[in-house]
Image (spheres, grey):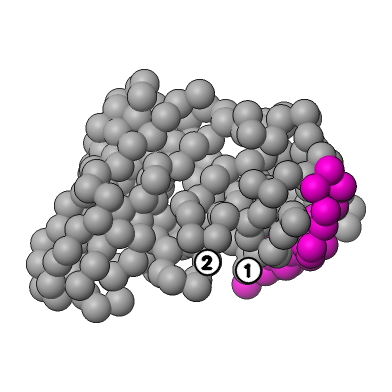
Amino acid sequence: DIQMTQSPPTLSASVGDRVTFTCRASQSISSYLNWYQQKPGQVPKLLIYAASSLQSGVPSRFSGRGSGTDFTLTISSLQFEDFATYYCQQSYSLPFTFGPGTTVEI
Amino acid sequence: EVRLVESGGGLVQPGRSLRLSCATSGFIFDNYAMHWVRQAPGKGLEWLSGINWQGGDIGYADSVKGRFVISRDNATRSLFLQMTGLRPDDTALYYCVQVGRAAALKSWGQGTLVTVS
């Protein structure tokens, strides 16, 4: 199975900051990497699919990059509503696997 | 609007079985693969199982392989998860998920809570 890791586990930031966090796969997954946002008590929401494609309705301040084993999610200017946990997930091969998440704190 | 509504969760004793259902609307059900994902209280997301549009291609996480069975009924636009041999560590909120481009998990239900105790 493909293992996913994320860093850092927690990130402290302020409104307006540019933040980047990373996701790494244990083997190449091409560009089959997706990012989700989950706020406390809410359902996860797809932000980015195929490493860099923005899901419809997601603000353009979110962007994703990478291929192979190393990926990043960047929020260009952090907004109050962006404080949440972000998960990466590989959809390259079954079983699909999630990373442990990065929590963005105020 | 895509709507996914899970049901069938509840309190169950260890070793017993439970069948989860997911009723769908707002999209052409038999055009899409569907998956189950769970989240234990205070923990991260765990992918459990997926099924392609016709039911011929199925996968499971190692943690549930041999105990859980995914199925779908395209006629009734429903997804199912038959869970047997339930353990306390199966306690979680179980989400039904529609799969989109690049097999990303596009639309999520609100989840149904399974408590094994």
**Residue B100 visible in the displayed image:** no
What residue sits right under mark 2 in the picture? A43
Q: Residues within 10 Å of mark 2 (few under 14, many from 20)?
A: some
Residue B60 vs A7, above or below: the answer is: above
- Residue type at the position of mark 1: Gln
Looking at the rendering, the stretch of residues picked out in magenta corresponds to B1-28
Residue A14 vs B42, above or below: the answer is: below
What residue sits right under mark 1 in the picture? B110
Q: Could you tell me which residue is drawn at 63 percent across and 56 percent down? A: B92
Quarter holding the C terminus of chain A is bottom left
Q: Real-space Cα distance between discs 1 and 2?
A: 6 Å
User: For numbered disc 2, what is the local secondary structure?
Assistant: loop
Residue B117 location (% of width, % of height): 75, 56
Look at the numbered discs 1 and 2 and tell me whether their residues touch, using CB distance below 8 Å. yes
Q: How many marks?
A: 2
Give a yes or no on whether discs 1 and 2 share a subunit.
Answer: no
**Residue A10 visible in the displayed image:** yes
Chain of residue at mark 2 = A
Q: Is residue B40 left or right of residue A81?
A: right
Q: Could you tell me which residue is drawn at 15 percent across and 58 percent down? A: A19
Q: Is residue B12 left or right of residue B29?
A: right
Q: For the view shown, which residue lies furthest in the top direction?
A: A27
The front one of B94 and B11 is: B11
Q: Quadrant of residue A67?
A: top left
Q: Could you tell me which residue is drawn at 30 percent across and 33 percent down? A: A24
Residue B2 location (% of width, % of height): 64, 67
Residue B68 location (% of width, % of height): 77, 38
